[in-house]
Structure formats: structure tokens, C-alpha cells
Amino acid sequence: MKKKVLIVFKYLRANWNPYVIKKFSNYYETEYLYISEYKNKNFTEIVEDINRLIEQKNIQIVVFDVDYFKFINFFFIKKIISEIKILITGDDSELHEINSITASSCDLILSHCPLSVLKYKEKGYQAYQIHFDNGEIIKNKLIKKEFDVLFFGNVTQDRKEFLNYIENKGISLKNIGYESGSGLPIDELLKFISKSKIVLNLSKSRTVKSVKSYTSENIYKFLYTFKGRIIIAGLNGAACVSEYSPGQELIFTNDEVPTFFTKEECVKILKKLLSDNELLAKCTNSFNSKTEKLFEDKINFLPIYNAIEKIEKRKVKLFNIPYWYLRISAKSILLRNLKLSNIIKSVYHFHIIFSIIKNSNIFIKFLIILESIINILWYSLLFTLKSKK
């Protein structure tokens, strides 16, 4: 009899959630919920509802979707009653500082990026790489390659300039990227990839604002991050030419995924591959073969399944939880469903705030309690006024 899994998502993302659900469903009976649907419930009510569901359905494993969502934090996860708790992250390069603290409430970490996996292992976590997008091998070698080079993904100003440069140098580029929204439906996207000789991957993080550090100023203009479009390209029969990222360097050789740092290097590589059919075929075949061996759905999830079945209860113990994390957590607990009409419920949640700061020094306790009082008064008024508009 299969074990039961509950996946706690932040909110619905049509091009992401279904694939996470499918990967677990191959091995477990899988339930899921979205925190965004708990619109009129506070921290305690949400925790109680989830624990009630876990008990009613006899769920043994709970998976938490944490990226860019401060509500699902260390203290929230600690309140959830489950035999095994798993954290999943797809944007850990930007969020590792906060995610690695949240992770200490979990038994297992699943990350999209191989470099991120090593960072967690360095801290003592059990961590595995998981591919979050479609992991089926649906390529068809008989499909006619209509496009020389394909780009898809978010088109930032930096990327727009890069793509324009490539086209101006005579490269035939099919750009199906987007500047707002989320791009093409996945089925249409996969058809474009299958019809393309080469997928171009740009690995720089999107904007300065997206590289958010919680413990220091924003210092770096961008990060070189591992992108899922590399794997999607390999599973759908295209070659991939990629901007450098240390994550991909851990998996692929330069012969499998030719790599560049500058737009000039990119053009040189593309022209070389497109002018030599034998070289392009060799590159494509070796890249596709490795991608299939590592990232096809069942193959990719099998070591994760084995780790869950033989879970080692060795959670990482923190020396302390930093002030900035306590502030974020306290605010997310108190401000959930906050209005003047239910301000008493928020005041009631101060017993949770006291519990999360009990091991802090007196100065930190004072600052967080003071800020929490101010937050309750200010935001209850602000949210009430907004709801009346």
C-alpha cells in the first residue's frame, strides 16, 4: 500500500504545480492544497486545518513549497504534525540564506540546482536534485527542425539587448520569450523545442531586485543560476548552448552543453554548430542521452524515493535563529487575515511570538515585540481601509 503525501503549495502555478504533483504521484498517493485559498484564516487556523487534514487522511509525508513565501517558515513547518517533512525550492540561488534556516525544520531538501544541493549538504542536510518541469521524454527525431536557434523565458532588458546582438550577427533566432505573464502553455512550448536545432539558455538572474539578501545590502548585479530550460531542451531533442552557470558545470561537459560568457563567444559557438551538421548532431546526441539518463521523471525521482523510504532523522540544529528571520516570521504570523474586526485574534498570536523569541537576548525580544505591536495597529487599520474600497 502506497504512503500518502500532502504537498503544501503557496498558490496555483499552472506550469509548475502539476509536474511536482505528478512526480510524487508516481510513487505515492498524493494530496495537495494552496495556502492562497485560506483567505479568511489566520496562522493558527491554517495550521489546525492542515493538521486535521493530515489526521483524517492518514498522511505520513508533507512537502512544503517555500520560495518567495515568508508565511511557510521554520515556525509554521514545526507546527505541522507529520512523520516526514520535505522542503522544495526552485530558486534557491536567490533565497538560500532564508531557505537554509527554514530547512532545519525538515528532514529532506529537494532543490532544482545541483550547486544548491551541495550547499545544503555542506550544512549537514540530506539534499537531492529534482527537476520540477515536465520530465517526460517526448522528443521525436523525425520532427523537422524548422528553427536554428530558439529562446524562451523572461525577456529582461539585458536579455533583449543580448538577443538583438545575436540576430544582428546573422543568427536565425526564434524568440518566443515574454516580458510579462508566464509565456506559452507547456504543450506549445515543447513543440517549439522539438522543432528547434538549438535552445539558447541565458543564465543570469533577471534583475538586481530579484537578488535579495536578507543579511546584507544588494551587492551583486546578477547571479549565474542553473535554469530548467537546459533540461527541457535535452528531453525534447534539441541541443543547448548556454551562458555559464556553476550548476550546469557540475552536470554537463562543454562538449555536451557548449558554454559562453560573452555575446561574442555565444555567436561564435552558434555559427560553428550551425555550419557543421556532424558536430551539431554529435553535440545534440550526447547532451540528449545524458539528460534522459539523469532527468527522466522516474529516473530522477528514484533516489529521492529511496531516501524518503529510508529517511535518516538527522535534522540540522541551528546555533541560533538570526534577528532578521525572527522579524520576518513574526510579521507573517501576525498579519495573516488581519483587520480591525479580528485584532483580538492577532493579539492572541503573541503567545506564538513569545515562543519564537524565547531563546533570544533581551534586546532582540524588545525590538520584535515593539515592532509586532506597531505592525498590528498599523496594518489592521490599513487592511480594513483597503477592504472597504
Image (cartoon, rainbow, N blue to C red):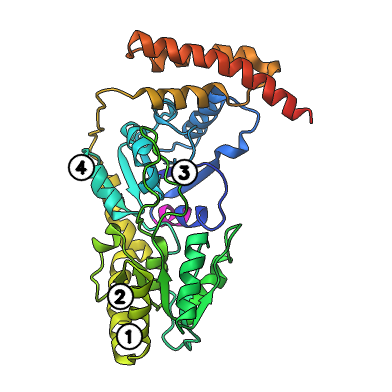
Please tell me whether residue 249 is drawn above or below residue 340 in the rendered image: below
Secondary structure mostly seen in the magenta stretch: helix
Secondary structure, mark 2, is helix
Residue 168 in the magenta stretch? The answer is: no
Disc assigned to residue 122: 4
- Residue 250 at what x, y percent from top left? 23, 60
The reply to whether residue 310 is in sight is no
Q: CA distance from mark 2 to mark 4?
A: 29 Å
- Residue 5 at what x, y percent from top left? 43, 44
Could you tell me which residue is drawn at 49 percent across and 82 percent down? Answer: 195
Please tell me whether residue 141 is drawn above or below residue 29 in the rendered image: below
Foreground residue among 309 and 128: 128
Which residue is disc 2 drawn over?
Answer: 287
Q: CA distance from mark 2 to mark 1?
A: 17 Å
- Residue flagged by tag 4: what amino acid is it? Glu
For marks 2 and 4 on the same chain, the one whose residue lies earlier in the sequence: 4
- Residue flagged by tag 2: what amino acid is it? Phe
For marks 2 and 1 on the same chain, the one whose residue lies earlier in the sequence: 1
Q: CA distance from mark 3 to mark 2?
A: 32 Å
For marks 1 and 4 on the same chain, the one whose residue lies earlier in the sequence: 4
For marks 1 and 3 on the same chain, the one whose residue lies earlier in the sequence: 3
- Counting every numbered tag in the picture gives 4
For marks 3 and 2 on the same chain, the one whose residue lies earlier in the sequence: 3
Q: Which label lies toward us, 1 or 3?
A: 1
Location of residue 348 (image quadrant): top right
Q: CA distance from mark 1 to mark 3?
A: 45 Å
* The residue stretch that appears in magenta: 21-26
